[in-house]
Amino acid sequence: MTSTVVRTEALVQDSSRGARMQARAVVATQLVTDAAGCARTRICGLRSEAPLVLRPTIGKGAEPGVRRDGGAARVTIAAGAAGPVGGDRLELTVLVGAGSTLVLTEASSTLLLPGRDGATSRADVDLTVEAGGTLVWLPEPVIAAHGCDHLMTVRAKVAKDARLLARDEILLGRHDETPGLLRTRWRVDGPDGPLLAQDLELGTRAGRSAAVAGRYRAVGSLVVVTPEWARDTTRASELLADTTAYLPLGGGTAVVSALADDSRGLRNVLDDAMARLGPPWEVDGE
Amino acid sequence: MDHRAALLLLADGRLPAGGYAHSGGLEPAVAMGRVRDLADVEDFLTGRLETVGVVAASFAAAACHAAYRLDGARLGALEAGLDARMPSPASRRTSRQLGRQLRRVVTTLRHDPRLELVGGEPHHPVMLGVVAAVFDVEPTGAALAVLHEAATGVATAAVRLLALDPLAAHAVVAGLAEHLDELAAQCVSWSSQEVEALPAWGAPLLDLGAEQHVRRSGRLFAS
């Protein structure tokens, strides 16, 4: 039996091998005052590198906690190629400047594919939300195809009075496909220390056990940091559906953890959960 | 010198620190029909050990290491790190309840200022690490005690919950012995790392089960 731990070490060795494709994308925002004296968010940094193509966009779909007329910035990520495949390394850096608001979405889901030499593919996401800023990050699902070996790391630094709402959706294989190996690593830190640290390993025997994901093929979460909730003692854990739970942590942080049979089922329960988060995450205009 | 008899005491489920009242999340998994037979129990146990088991054992080893150096700040950081690794409030409460009970038992056995290095209701792995240091047990012993208790606790509960043959249930634990040693050695190798870098393996169905369990009546085990 190979342990989780041993595999993690193997990963470090893998990453030292030559990466096949490396791409680094950046988006940064700041709060500015326009000619009419209104505060609005300006995109002050936008760097794309194939296959990560970032584009300013207009608001569509539900945007929790974002007022339609509130001058938020919207950026969508369009992947310009299939993959990532084993050996690829993608990096996304997001900086939401003090007081500004960014809604970051994705055009399509990501299909994780194996490389020829069995190397690990990596996606590293670095999120910084400065004081009073708001980041709504709603990427599309990540699909673990047969034979893939992928590590996604998300590091979020959330300053005082800053808000974060992030969605994470994992699909274990396409239709009737045995999934490869997928690890996710989340570290969310607030001004006073760690808020959330969760690693997940799927596509293994342990991952298929009734302790981790069992027979479910879709695993997802919402990660929410809401400073207004930090001192609200009325926010208790709640079972939102058979396999969906709202789980409050310290510092105004909460996780909605969900398992489902397929991507549609997962999106439905996460959408429902998002609609029930309450202030300040109401959807404007609905 | 490693104090082996003390380690056996710490890892013994009969120590009146409350561990015997817990199924390690097996009862809700059985109640939801996700664990039905011995093979399921073995998978469940493997899944539990390699996720939250490794996290708890790593933090126990790190806490033991910190207690030897009287590093209260490090123990505080480990406490906060565990909170961030346990999304389920029900699981956090169980961990702190077990930590408090362990502290109560040990303070009647030993007077040691290191027992005051952690707050009134410490997480169980942190408290166990401190207690291990108090009994001159090395960090490896602390990690092993956590993994061993996790394994035997589930196996014992499985006998009651699924009416399994006790010999068959413990054969599963015996089969994992080498794996537990290997996991413990890995957990110890991270003892002095930054808290952020320590393992944080999550187990969504365990979190869900813990929350479902506290809302259910007629439970056999506390968790």
Image (spheres, coloured by chain):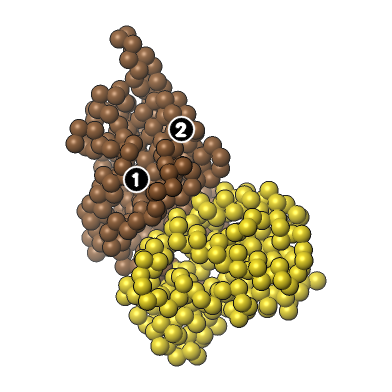
- Residue at horizontal 31 percent and vertical 67 percent from the top: A215
SS at circle 1:
strand
Pinpoint residue A266: horizontal percent, then vertical percent: 26, 54
Rendering quarter of residue B12: bottom right
Please tell me the numbered disc located at residue A125: none
Residue A116 visible in the current orientation: no
Element under disc 2: loop
Q: Residue at x 41, y 82 (%)?
A: B161
Label 1 environment density (alpha carbons within 10 Å; few <14, some 14–19, many ≥20):
many
Is residue B70 placed above or below A18 in the rendered structure?
below
- The amino acid type, in three-letter code, at marker 2 is Asp
Query: Residue under mark 1: which chain is it in?
Result: A
Residue A21 horizontal/vertical position (percent): 41, 41
In the rendered picture, chain A carries what hue? brown
The residue type indicated by label 1 comes to Arg
Residue at the spot 45% in from the left edge and 61% down from the top edge = B90
From the top left corner, tell me how far across and down residue A50 is, in percent.
35, 34
The residue at which mark 2 appears reads as A161
Check if mark 2's residue and mark 1's residue have beta carbons within 8 Å: no
Which label is found at residue A167? 1
The colour assigned to chain B within the rendered structure: yellow
Residue A175 visible in the displayed image: yes
Of residues A41 and B178, the one nearer the viewer is A41
- Residue most extreme to the right: B1
What is the C-alpha distance between the residues marked 2 and 1?
A: 20 Å
Q: Quadrant of the N terminus of chain B?
A: bottom right
Location of residue A253 by image quarter = top left
